[in-house]
Amino acid sequence: MKINLLSLYLILFTLLSSLIVPAYADAAYISPTLILPYENLSGQPELDWIGEGVRNYLQQHLGLIEGAQFIRPEYLKPFLQSGQIPTLNISNPEAVRKIGNLVQAQFVIYGAYNKTQTLEFTTYLLDVRTGGGKSIPVVTGNQDELLSVIHEILKGAASVLGLELVEDESRMPLPTQNLGAFAAYTKAYEALLFFDDADKALENCQQAIKLDNQYEEALSLLIKLYEMKSSWKQLPALYKRYEEFLEARKDRHRLREVYDKIIPIYTNIDRPDLALRYCNKELKLSQAQRDRKLEASCYVKIGAIYQEKKNYNSAIIYHLKALAIQNKLGNNSAMGAINCTLGNLYFIRGLDVSALKHLKKATSHFRQVNDRNGIGKVYSRMGKVYAHKKQYDKALKYSREAAGILEQSKNQEELIELYDNMGDIYFNQANYNEALGYFQKILELLPDTESSPRALSVYNKIATLQLRQSRDKEAIDTYRKIIKLQEKTNSANDSVIAYYHLGSIFLRGKKYEEAIDYLKQAEEGFQRIKDRERLSDVYHSLAEAYEKNKKYLQALKYQLKNLEVVRTTSDSYSLAATYYYISAIYDRLGQYEKAINYVEKAVELDRKLASPNERRDLDYMRQLKEKLKRPAPSVLPTKLEDNPPTAKPDRL
């Protein structure tokens, strides 16, 4: 039988929702028992919720008895949806027996209620195999006493099952004294349990909390609902209240559960400071209980948060603390995982020797527990370290061994990382076909190449390979694909770079109008993200495109823009080259004095830099001085004009 996600949450909720555990006497084992909602015989629909309220209360409290087996109500849902069961609120013995047979129950508790001046409840126990049954004494009471009435029904149900409750009422408090809150909670639970209506459940659960802000069961359900909706921002305040309830009862076991839940929530909403606060609370709890295994786990969590914050030194310190504990405990699996993480952390810091030391230790620990997948992960990381050291033969050796293991385990995330590294290694060896093969393997593994940020990264690498192999037509298609992908991934930087490369390709192909169009889009993007280095490259390329298209004033405009950017850098070689290019454009315009002025600046820098371009620039300066002696051109452009491209390339 298939159970959807909502049902799985309900199974967890049923196990965890009773926050106050009643005390029972020793109970005999009882066979699988189903509890049905009570049937409303009053003719007043506004009282329908009471039937589910009784069932819920009985299920939660009787279900806690050791040895008892109660069938979870969510297993009835498929029969309701298929029409095999028209309704659960029934008190007809034959219909009840049919339901019991469907879920293979031995006993069914069911009942009905009516309202005249008071509420009157009848409860029955049906033996599904024989059809025989027992009844418990009728329970009556006013509606405002409903919660106490339901508690009396619980006693009767326990009695008819042969279970003896401990009669200490103070040790078995009601979940709430507010009838409206109990009604709203019951409606919420029913909406989620039988109808998968999370929105209605959320609305009713919020009402329950509003009416009784100390209603722990309602708070617990509300937390589950927000978790199902991934509404992370609402959860911290709710967990904080839940934590206060548990601290008041000194329920350390459930406090640990809360800390485990709330730490990743604060990480998800980018509050590492609060995630660390709760990690430290859990750490203190583990130390108070002398739970060394939990203490080590806390150190790993703290280290992971510092790693996320890029505080790698602190991350290493806490992982080393965890490792020291696991060494004493002799936990090879944990030692393997922590050493693997430490290897990665040292690699990020550029400490390759320390990285390899821990990765080799991780391999040893994983071998002792025959963890092939763990070994594959370690080999993959060793491949990255050796690649960083430019020891490509060793890098490929470990990477191939990792591939042999990880391909069998079908660990896609690890395989993607591995193939990416292998592609980079082959690229650095100028083995472009092999590199391309591994990047294409990544695309085959990705579930969605149309909107995945990872796919965007791979396409950028493929485009770079195509450019290296002078496969410009294929590179154009890839860069256009990157621009299309950017719209779905909001990776503006990637599309800006794609525009620049497309402009450069069309410039090389002497398609100047298309080149200018793409380069202007790149200019706009680099200005937006304030990437001055690349903006300088775009200005230079635009100047070149206009110059080749004989639009010298536009070429001059962009070289002067380039000069403004280059002057803000410490790149004297680029500054000298820019002076030279500006000089060449003034030469084209016949403005030789200005051309000489800029080439002189280039020569001055060449001498300071001992540049090999000094002789070339001196020769050019002499040629310009010769030209200056000749008559000036009869017609010269006198102002900068806007000459936009007359045609634009098609857009994908």
Image (spheres, grey):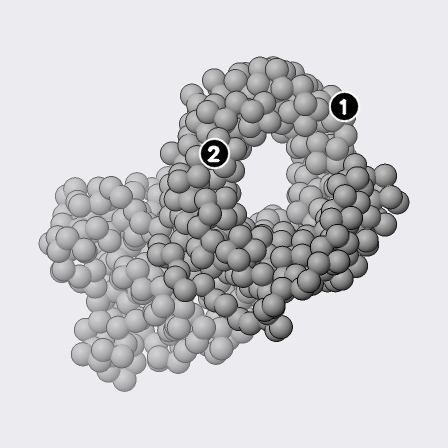
Specify whether 417 is left or right of 271.
left
Q: Which residue is drawn at 48% across and 67% down?
A: 644
Q: In this view, does 522 lie above or below 112?
A: above
Can you say which quadrant of the picture contains the C terminus? Answer: bottom left
Cα separation, mark 1 vs mark 2, equals 38 Å
- Nearest the viewer among 574 and 391 is 574
Viewed as shown, does residue 649 lie left or right of 218? Answer: left
Q: Mark 2 falls on what kind of element?
A: loop
Residue 92 vs residue 412, the one in the foreground: 412
Q: Which of 525 and 57 is in front in this view?
A: 525
Q: Tell me the number on the disc at residue 386.
A: none
x 75%, y 33%: residue: 350
Q: Looking at the picture, does residue 509 appear above or below residue 119?
A: above
Query: Do the CB atoms of the residues marked 1 and 2 lie less than 8 Å apart?
Result: no
Query: Amino acid type of disc 1?
Result: Val
Residue at image location 68% in from the left, 27% down from the top: 388
> Which amino acid type corresponds to the residue marked 2 in the rendered image?
Ser
Q: Quarter-wise, where is residue 277 in the image?
A: bottom right
Marks counted in the figure total: 2
Percent x, y for residue 314? 78, 43
Label 1 or label 2, whichever comes before in sequence order? 1
User: Few, some or many C-alpha atoms within 10 Å of disc 2 (few <14, some 14-19, many ≥20)?
Assistant: few
Vertical order, 643 against 355 (above or below): below
Query: Which disc is residue 353 wearing?
Result: 1
Q: Which residue is drawn at 87% across and 44% down?
A: 607
- Residue 456 x/y as whole percent: 47, 45
Closer-to-camera residue (537/620): 620
The local crowd at label 1, few if under 14, some if 14 to 19, many if 20 or more residues have their Cα within 10 Å, is: some
Q: Position of residue 581 (x, y in %)?
A: 68, 52
Secondary structure of the residue carrying numbered label 1:
helix
The percent coordinates of residue 507 (x first, y second) are: 50, 48
Q: Mark 2 points at which residue?
A: 470
